[in-house]
Image (tube, rainbow, N blue to C red):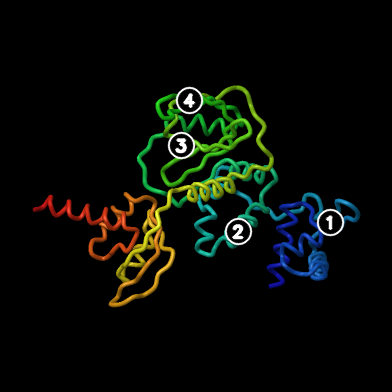
Amino acid sequence: MRADRLLSILLLLQNHERLTSRELAERLEVSERTIHRDMEALSGSGVPVYAERGAGGGWALAKGYRSNLTGMKTEELQSLLLASPPAPLRDLGMGVGFEGAIAKLLSALPKTMQQSADHVRQRLHIDGAGWHQSNETFPYLASIQEAVWQERKLLIRYQRDSSIVERLIHPLGLVAKRSVWYLVAQVDADMRTYRISRLIAAQMLEESFVRPLDFDLASYWDKSTQEFKAALPRYPAQVLVKESLITRLELERYMKIASTKPVANGWMEAEVEFHTLESATELILGYGAHIQVIGPDELREKVIAEAQAILCLYD
């Protein structure tokens, strides 16, 4: 594994220009003594690595030294970075491999292309885990994208309840969630998310804005998504369900199984969480005789009333 570690050190130094022994040791999960031995090995193999002493010092490569990756255009690099979003790969246990591959790719690029790649990743995020499919249209997407790229202020108008609201915003990034596009923007000191299909006007202004240095688009979107899910309504219930149905129920969008325990004859007792009384009733009726409500009483009564209404309809 030492050869892999030496390559990792080389790539880290190409990406970060200068790192201390402690920083390298922490990133590679080895001792500082091991880092010193690795540096001797790199130097002995002809890699121009040297140490700078004092405050702000560390290990660095000779100016101008790097392995070259030729023949790749900026547009090709951008499409590659956006084609494989990290989140789904992390779910498959491949997140570390993806980030490692990106690090190797970036380290071999000229500095100008590295900056271009970072520019794209901070302004466009692809979220592949969709809530639902959509046929929405986005007539202002092109102008919004231009404002994001050029860091120009946007004047937008959108419908809110019965009124039309106008806002002057700083567009920070775009997020694609399946076929739905969102705009992440700064409004005064707050961060807001706008569904682009709901905008009724978007005008890019000549005035530019200063992008927050600590803003990371992917991190903001992950946090925002978690907060949205946490704010959804919750309706707890207890049900009896056929054991063969558990795997299918775990995939339901509007139902979460908190716990289960076997009872008898292939049935399971489950603590579940729906969003609302109405959605719970619809979902339970959809599974017919394979789910029986234990509680609460209002859910039992509503399911029974709906079932009786169905019988009357066909009587």
Using the image as rendered, state which of residue 144 and residue 110 is in the foreground.
144
Residue at image x 81%, y 67%? 32
Per the model, the C-alpha gap separating discs 1 and 4 is 53 Å
Q: Is residue 262 above or below residue 284?
A: below
Contact between labelled residues 3 and 1, with CB atoms less than 8 Å apart: no
Under mark 3, the amino acid is Arg
Kind of residue at disc 4: Val
What separation in Å lies between label 1 and label 2 (alpha carbons)?
25 Å
The answer to whether the residues at label 1 and label 2 have Cβ atoms under 8 Å apart is no
Earlier-in-chain disc, 1 versus 4: 1
State the residue in front, 304 or 143. Answer: 304
Q: Residues within 10 Å of mark 2 (few under 14, many from 20)?
A: few
Question: What residue is disc 4 on?
Answer: 165
Mark 3 — residue?
195
Of callouts 2 and 4, which one flags the residue occurring earlier in the amino acid sequence? 2
Q: CA distance from mark 2 to mark 4?
A: 45 Å
Query: SS class of the residue under badge 4?
Result: strand
Name the foreground residue: 58 vs 301. 301
Which residue ends up furthest to the left in the rendered image?
315
Could you say whether the residue bearing mark 2 is in a helix, strand or loop? helix
Given the image, on which type of amino acid does mark 2 rest? Ala
Q: Is residue 29 left or right of residue 56?
A: left
In percent of width and height, residue 87 lies at 53, 55
Q: In the figure, 119 relative to 188: above or below? A: below
Q: Residues within 10 Å of mark 1 (few under 14, many from 20)?
A: some
Tag 2 near tag 3, CB within 8 Å: no
Residue position for label 2: 101
Q: Is residue 32 left or right of residue 76?
A: right
The picture places residue 13, in percent across and down from the top left corner, at 75, 56
Residue at (58% x, 62% y) in the render: 97
* Upstream in sequence: badge 2 or badge 3: 2
